[in-house]
Image (spheres, rainbow, N blue to C red):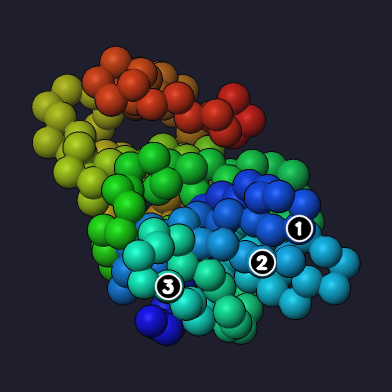
Amino acid sequence: MIFCDYGIVLMRRPLRESDRIVTVFTLEHGKLEVNFKGVRLAKGKLRALSEAFSWGDYRFYLKKGSNFPVCTGGRTLSVFGGIRQDLDRIYMAQHYCEVVNKLTPAASPSPEKYDLLLGALDDLDACGTAFWLRRAFTLRALDLAGFGFRETATGPEAELWDTLHAGSWTAVRALPDDERAAVFIDGLFSRFFSGQVDINLRTLPFVK
């Protein structure tokens, strides 16, 4: 079966000498583990489509009885060049992708989560990092995954809380730094990820 879909690369890992297994979060088919054959070779034609946090229009082939589609073609829509020029932006983009990856079951489409990730990467690419971005993104991803804290009764001021959950990225960037509120939110994340769902976010030490 051949099918096409838009997708964002969440992570990749080497397979044998020249291949990669790439986790692609697609718009219509959800999170897929995809075999990219030969992309680690110098002449690998699909290399750009297999790179971390790349956005593309993919063509896949799924053999009957197999769980791993093979990427047979496609076109790159964006590699987010602004992100790749700055280490802090790279870490943040990787963190966004890891959060979505850890909160998304395989083959479970979520257009809302897809749009959240794509919008956050676009914003990061254009404008760089900011104090509240990581927390706003994680709160929204948790909300879409059914684990949200939006109705939490105590903690940050209502205007801050509402902006983090539903404001534009421009509005999130305009929020004043508030270390006390940030510590409160980070505490919520820590208790949820490590205590409730036993998830270790490997990118967390590298983002602010």
The x and y percentages for residue 90 are 67, 48
Q: Which residue is mark 2?
A: 37
The x and y percentages for residue 45 are 75, 77
Identify the mark at residue 65; answer none if there is no mark. none
Q: Who comes first in sequence, dot 2 or dot 3?
A: 2
Q: Residues within 10 Å of mark 1 (few under 14, many from 20)?
A: some
Quadrant where the N terminus is found in the figure? bottom left
Label pair 2/1, CB-CB below 8 angstroms: yes
Identify the mark at residue 63; answer none if there is no mark. 3
Is 90 left, or right, of 58 in this rendering? right
The x and y percentages for residue 62 are 42, 73
Q: Amino acid at mark 2?
A: Lys
Q: Who comes first in sequence, dot 2 or dot 1?
A: 1
Quadrant where the C terminus is found in the figure? top right
Q: Who comes first in sequence, dot 3 or dot 1?
A: 1
The x and y percentages for residue 195 are 29, 15
Which is in the foreground here, disc 3 or disc 1? Answer: 3
Q: Amino acid at mark 3?
A: Lys
Q: Which residue is mark 1?
A: 18
Is 17 left, or right, of 136 in this rendering? right
Q: Is residue 194 above or below residue 89?
A: above
For image coordinates 71% across by 50% down, the residue present is 16
Q: Amino acid at mark 1?
A: Ser
Tell me the distance, in whole angstroms, between the alpha carbons under discs 2 and 3.
Answer: 15 Å
Q: Residues within 10 Å of mark 2 (few under 14, many from 20)?
A: many
Q: Secondary structure at mark 3?
A: loop
For image coordinates 47% across by 77% down, the residue present is 61
